[in-house]
Image: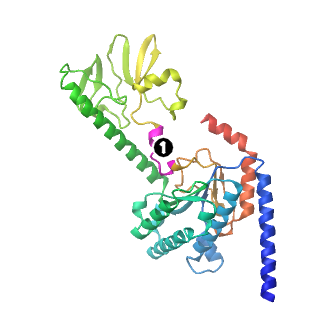
Amino acid sequence: MGNESSWSGSHCLSTLSNFFRKYLFRVLSCGAIPTHIAFIMDGNRRFAKKQNMVEGEGHRAGYKSLISMLKYCYELGVKYITVYAFSIENFKRKPEEVQYLMDLMIEKIDELLQEGNIVNQYGMRLYFIGNLKLLNEEVRVAAEKAMKATAHNTQSVLLICVAYTSYDEIVHAVQESCEEKMINIQAKNTIKAGYNSTEQNGSCDKMNGVYPPEIQDCHKHEVHGTVIPGKNEICCNGFSKVEASKKKNGVIKRAVPGFHAEKWNEVPESMQSQLSNGTIESSEDGETVQEIKPLINLVDIEKHMYMAVAPDPDIVIRSSGETRLSNFLLWQTGYSPLYSPAALWPEIGLWHLVGVVLHYQRNYSYLQKKRKQS
């Protein structure tokens, strides 16, 4: 009888709590709601020490906090959640701790995929973000299985950063961009080679806004009246260290690294046709200047980022009061405010989230203005 009374009281309390939370979120929804929140889950080990828990149990307590926070965020209407679960730097910890965390990760991935869990409840798609090749095979297989199993979910998105640092992400994106451009250039060179074999006039054309590698490999060539620097005079970004010094028909050709348009629709219509041909024409001292666009643009880098599957975070929350990003989403958070509640990650809860959202709403106009100016 006592057990039934206890269960009834607990159920009633849970119902009231859910009703209050929904009412609270409805009020918050009158203002701007972040589309993407990123969490740095800091303080699990300190929490375990503070509570005299067995080493490693702090991470289990942190997982419970994560599930609660995911539930609150998705009920509030936040579509994207990113969590910093395991840094590449964390591999430097004691081997037994790293192994414990890997085993815990496998266990919790399996839990997430169980019927009726939060993934199915909120139509959640899972992404594991980072250099997954650094993970052991068992963890990597579990991560790939989870991503495949949730690939058709569209209601919400959870991005779990494992074996991740921003430095690694940026290097990866640059390497992928260079490889992609090289493949494109080689393909066009093959086509050009067939054309040039029938045109033995010594002329050379630009491809993708730069001269082909076989031209750059030479010491120095004169093409259409323009001096083209040799291989040793080409910078890594495709620009010449030395401006072309000759001109023909009043046109100076040179590479100018001042073009920074991020998206095609941001480029003025008057420039789009010129960019398609790899050049921008402008006037300088009464003469026409033909500027060669960069070989690799910002858009090329961003599309190869691990985080290209999600918009930039609106908010970054780091528990435990720390105000460092610790090599987390450095590329994506230039205009994302950082909030640092003093609570350790296992202690974080609903009211911390409410406070952060209210602060975000008070500063929303300013934040949007800064984003538009960027």
Say if residue 329 shows up in the picture. Answer: yes
Q: Quadrant of residue 21?
A: bottom right
Q: Assign the N terminus to one quadrant of the image.
A: bottom right
Residue 238: % across, % down = 36, 33
Q: What stretch is highlighted in magenta?
A: 298-308
Say if residue 162 shows up in the picture. Answer: no
Q: Residues within 10 Å of mark 1 (few under 14, many from 20)?
A: some
Q: Foreground residue, 323 or 281? A: 281
User: From the viewer's perspective, is 301 left or right of 333?
Assistant: left
User: From the viewer's perspective, is 296 left or right of 182?
Assistant: right
Report the predominant secondary structure element of the magenta stretch: helix
Q: Quadrant of residue 356?
A: bottom right
User: From the viewer's perspective, is 8 left or right of 76?
Assistant: right
Compared with 211, 141 (above or below) is below
Q: Is residue 285 in the magenta section? A: no
Q: Foreground residue, 175 or 160? A: 160
Q: Which residue is drawn at 66% across and 78% down?
A: 51
Number of numbered discs overlaid on the protein picture: 1
Compared with 311, 236 (above or below) is above
Residue 327: % across, % down = 52, 55
Q: Residue at x 58, y 54 (%)?
A: 154
Compared with 11, 362 (above or below) is above
Q: Is mark 1 on a helix, strand or loop?
A: helix
Q: Name the residue under label 1.
A: 302
